[in-house]
Image (cartoon, rainbow, N blue to C red):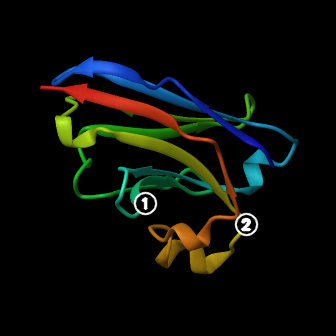
Amino acid sequence: VQLQASGGGLVQAGASLSLSCAASGRTFSSYHMGWFRQVLGKEREFVAAISRVSGTYYADSVKGRFTISRDNAKNTLYLQMASLRPEDTAVYYCAASRYGGSWYTSYMLSTRYDYWGQGTLVTVSS
C-alpha cells in the first residue's frame, strides 16, 4: 500500500487542524493504521492508532485533543487535532501495519508498521 499524508500547515496555539492520509490499493481495510510524529533530532513518537475494526488508541500527550478515524470506503485515514500546542509541532507520518493480534499490545511501536507516508509538517506558533 502507498500512503500520502496531507493537511499540515502553520497555525496558532489553540487552533485546530485536520490531517488526511490517502491510501492506494483495495486492501486498506485490512491494515491497522497509525499516526506518528517526529521533531528534527528526536525519535519518531507515537500519536494515535486505529485498528482494522476501528478501535482507537492515543498517546497520553494528545488524549482528549486528537481524534483518529478511518473511512474504508474512501481508503483514507484522518487525524483531527484540536487545542494545538507549540509542542505539537512536528512532521506527522501515517503508517500501515499488517501485524495480527500482536499489534494490539505494540501499536505504539514504529517497528510494527510496514508502510509509511512521506510526512506532513505541522507548526504551532505560540
Q: Which mark is residue 98?
A: 2
Label 2: how many Cα within 10 Å (few below 14, some 14–19, many 20+): some
Local packing at callout 1 (Cα closer than 10 Å; few below 14, some 14-19, many 20+) is some
Residue at position x 57%, y 73% in the image: 111
Towards the viewer: 4 or 125: 125
Q: Is residue 67 above or below residue 48?
A: above
Quick one: 52 or 36, which is closer to the camera?
A: 36
Residue 95 as seen in the image, left or right of residue 31:
left
Residue 46 x/y as whole percent: 40, 59
Q: What's the residue type where badge 2 is placed?
A: Arg
Residue 8: mark: none
Can you give x and y, in whole percent of width and height, for residue 55 in the image?
50, 55
Of 92 and 33, the residue lying toward us: 92
Residue 93 lies left or right of residue 88; in this view the side is right
SS class, disc 1:
loop
Q: What residue is shown at x 52% (from left), y 73% (from top)? A: 104
Q: Is residue 10 above or below residue 121?
A: above
Residue at label 1?
Answer: 44
The spot of residue 42 in percent (x, y) is 34, 61
Looking at the figure, which quarter contains the C terminus?
top left
